[in-house]
Amino acid sequence: MKKTVSMILRHVVLAFLAIVWLVPILWLVVTSFSAYKGINTSHFFPENWSLDNYRVLFLEPDSVVQYGAWFKNTLVIAIFTCIVSTVFVLMVAYTMSCLRFNGRKGLMSFGIILNMFPGVLSMIAVYFVMKSLGLTNSHLGMIIVYSAGSGLGYLITKGFMDTISTSLREAAWLEGASEATIFLKIIIPLSQPIIVYTVINSFLVPWGDFVLAKLMLNSGISTDWTIAIGLFNMLNKSLVNKYFSIFCAGGVIVSIPISALFVLMQKFYVEGVTGGSVKG
């Protein structure tokens, strides 16, 4: 009897949490198909349905909505950040996992401690450094900022590489293989699950970031913005009653690429997380 009651209570709590999470998302989706442009709190589902909000996003840009340009900017920044960050993480993880050198443990500890500090603490310093280099209001500057410290997130990838048998590397050394050859032809092919995990995380950071993007892209030229800045601008008090449904449509569109990526890579993503928690 106690087990039954406990199970029912757990399911009730889980169902409540699911509702709390899903209802706002559902409201966002249905509002994106509303013919009413402002916030309608009197009805959960729209009284009149329309696809006009999605048409405006891509086919009818104006001084407020430049969604096509925002999407392209965000995608370019996210792709290049993903590539550079993934390379950095893999190289640092391989160095810490497979190589032995003086100061290795101290460097690892320093990296872990440094990574514990929130990135916002260094934002002002980063901004003035980038400004002195002329890289503010620049997508290249955004890629550099997002990628520069990515190597500090090596720990999970290192944990996965620790599970790869050292006998494989030793056999390659005996055959005369260089460290680069071992890294590219042995470690990388065996690390596909954790590479997928790293790619997804590296892509997520610039794709959904608002704070750093708002700080760096401050010229006021809307075509240079990322999606996060553009959507936030629609919530301005003077604009929200005209653009809220379009904002919801933009939120639905921006979630599609990353949702598709998660669905396609879910198996590898889970293997990467669980594999990185086991040390051999």
Image: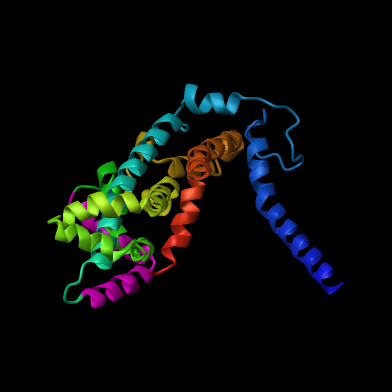
Decide whether residue 108 is among the magenta residues.
yes
Q: Main secondary structure of the magenta part?
A: helix
Along the line of sight, the residue nearer the viewer: 101 or 214: 101
In this picture, residue 117 sits left or right of residue 30: left
Q: Residue at x 29, y 42 (%)?
A: 139
Q: Position of residue 267 (x, y in %)?
A: 50, 49
Which part of the image, by quadrant, shows the C terminus?
Answer: bottom left
In this picture, residue 46 sits left or right of residue 123: right
Q: Position of residue 168 (x, y in %)?
A: 27, 60
Q: How many marks?
A: 0
Decide whether residue 86 is among the magenta residues.
no
Q: Position of residue 215 (x, y in %)?
A: 35, 52
Judge whether 185 appears above or below 72 on screen.
Answer: below
**The quadrant where residue 44 appears:** top right
The part of the chain drawn in magenta is 104-133
Along the line of sight, the residue nearer the viewer: 209 or 154: 154
Q: Position of residue 49 (x, y in %)?
A: 70, 27
Which of the colour schemes (rainbow, by chain, secondary structure, one colour) is used?
A: rainbow
